[in-house]
Image (tube, rainbow, N blue to C red):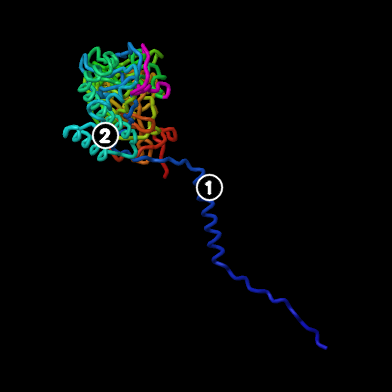
Amino acid sequence: MAKNNIREYKKPKNFNIGTLVFIVILLYLIVTLFTYFNTKHIVGYQVKTGSLSVSNVYEGIAMRDEVIVNSTQSGYINYYAREGEKVGSGKVVCTIDESGELQDILLKSKTDGSTVLSDKDLSEIKNDMINFKSAFNEKVFDSVYDFKSGIEGNVLKYSNQILMENLSEINSRYGNGMINMCTAPESGVVIYSTDGFEDKALNEVTEEWFDSSKHPKTQLINNSIVDVGDVLYKLSDNERWNILIRVDDDRIDELVEKEYVRVKFLKNQYESWGKVNVVDGADGVRYVALQFTNSMITFATDRYVDIELITDEESGLKVPNSSITEKQFFLIPVDYMAMSGNMGQTGVNKEVYKEDGTVAVEFIPTSIYCEENNEYYIDEDRLQVGDRIKKPDSQETYTISKVSNLTGVYNINKGYADFKQIQILNSNDEYSIIKSDTQYGLLAYDYIVLDAESVKTDEFIYN
């Protein structure tokens, strides 16, 4: 029987091009990631023109000359002058009714419980309603209370007219002296509330004043009981008044320099000019008092007033504060700056000693970063304190010794970190506005390093 000769079949090795491509891509990704994480990354920022968004809205405290009028009798008080309107000296502001029956008496008087309003009175109420409806904003619901107060004021005015028309008949029928008339001791704007600021002086201000929750308004209620000595109302008779605001010290100096500032009252968008005065508060803090000579009557019932200061904003080149740094430079007289004849490059002629002890002159190229007081700011890189430089076309020499700092940013237009001096006009927490078109500074659309701490002078930038 023949012996079987069985051999294992070996498959031929086929070259898989897909596997090779995958390995190459994988190696490329590994090298790329390694390079990325081990390379210094510099983030650039393009300089553009702009202005700073500085918050100019403040909650101020209105300070006026206010006189409190106290009651000399006891009884039920009834107000007849409209709050926020000016009354003349000797005019009736309120009455004190010892029995509390005045309202019933008025209804029983010859009006027979009905009040006939004139066409003028009706027109006034109608206009108030139309104006309120057209200007109503759901986000400013406080206006509802202002409208309510205005309508109540009109009612008081009409009631006052009725009282005056029937006063002699009421007194003759129910007895003289039953109704005590309270007249204004002097002319002024009537206010039916108190808050404790009435006798305060500007220089008594403290930080606590600006917490409105600690100074609630006490409203004087019509037809309530008063005793002798209780507050009836207060009068404000001086058109010169102030608004106190809290401002940081830098802002204070800026406002003082302006002397007068335009102020918008957010309550009604009214604008007026306020004189800037600095007040040293009782807590050692400086505050600003904006003094006005008009419009006191418009805000006579308000203690806390929201205002906006309308100031001219500085405009220029806008750069992030993180880009700004300081660098030290040597100062040399302008006359000692030389020019290379071959390259047209600026620099200085530095004295050097040869091996044989003779003195030679070596041209050291250097850029000019600023000119100030007839001196140039130049690099420190190839120079040091004590080096002597020679004035061009002269035997005079100057020993380098003066140093000073410049504020600036790193320009990266040419692919390396080139320091550029800047002049800051204004700044906030994030950005600064710098002067444009300076001789050694920046131009609009230049690229600068976003983080000045991430680079050094003349360092090449790899993107």
Residue 364 included in the magenta stretch of the image:
no
The residue segment tinted magenta is: 213-229
Residue at 32%, 38% (x, y): give it: 47
Q: Main secondary structure of the magenta part?
A: loop
Residue 221 included in the magenta stretch of the image:
yes
Residue 382 in percent (x, y) is at: 39, 28
Find disc 1 in the rendering and name its residue: 34
Around disc 1, counting alpha carbons within 10 Å, would you say few (fewer than 14), some (14 to 19), or many (20 or more)?
A: few
Residue at 28%, 16% (x, y): give it: 179
Residue lying furthest left: 119
Between residue 448 and residue 350, name the one nearer to us. 448
420 w.r.t. 195: above or below:
below
Residue 156 in percent (x, y) is at: 26, 26
Find disc 2 in the rendering and name its residue: 344
Dot label at residue 180: none
Residue 323 in percent (x, y) is at: 38, 33
Around disc 2, counting alpha carbons within 10 Å, would you say few (fewer than 14), some (14 to 19), or many (20 or more)?
A: few
Between residue 439 and residue 48, name the one nearer to us. 48
Local secondary structure at mark 2: loop
